Amino acid sequence: VQLQASGGGLVQAGDSLRLSCVASGRTFSRNTMAWFRQAPGKEREFVAFISWSGGTSYYEDSVKGRFTIARDNAKNTLYLQMNILKPEDTAAYYCAAERTDYSVYNARLAQVYEYWGQGTLVTVSS
């Protein structure tokens, strides 16, 4: 089982990026998926999650209104559309899939996620 994140890069403040996370080895159509990020010297933090069907999503306050999480279960792919990027968004971004089917309980917490991607680096210059 593998989650492969991509789409990161170096952009200027105000620009947009779309991250993708492709799952292989199994389907995650029954599992909540999420994006986390970790800036240099900081703890990994929650960014957003989306339920198995896409019907429920939740965002960390600092990205609300700028980031949109989405998924395409037919393609086994998770997305994060990031608009109006700020220098404080600079981080390695990790996708994750929850271990429990059909659950959003505690979905903001890293410990409920069993599968993790390798991270893709987003750098936003001012």
Image (spheres, rainbow, N blue to C red):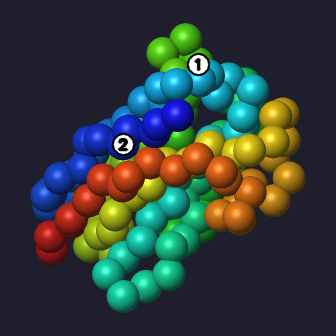
Q: Which mark is residue 109?
A: none
> Three-letter amino acid code at disc 2?
Ala
The residue lying toward the viewer, choosing from 67 and 108, is 108
Q: Position of residue 48 (x, y in %)?
A: 59, 53
The residue labelled by disc 2 is: 5
Which residue is the extreme one toward the top? Answer: 74
Identify the residue at horizontal 15%, vertical 57% (top origin).
11
Residue nearer the viewer, 70 or 24: 24
Q: Please state the horizontal and vertical placement of residue 2, each as a whole percent of the image.
A: 47, 37
Q: Is residue 107 left or right of residue 26?
A: right
* Left or right of 9 on screen, residue 32: right
The residue that appears at 54% across and 71% down in the rendered structure is 45
Residue situated furthest bottom in the rendering: 41
Callout 1: SS? loop
Q: State which quadrant residue 92 falls in.
A: bottom left
Query: Which quadrant would the C terminus be assigned to in this image?
Result: bottom left
Residue visible at 81% across and 59% down? 106
In the image, what residue type sits under mark 1? Asn
Q: Is residue 53 visible?
A: yes
Residue ID for mark 1: 73
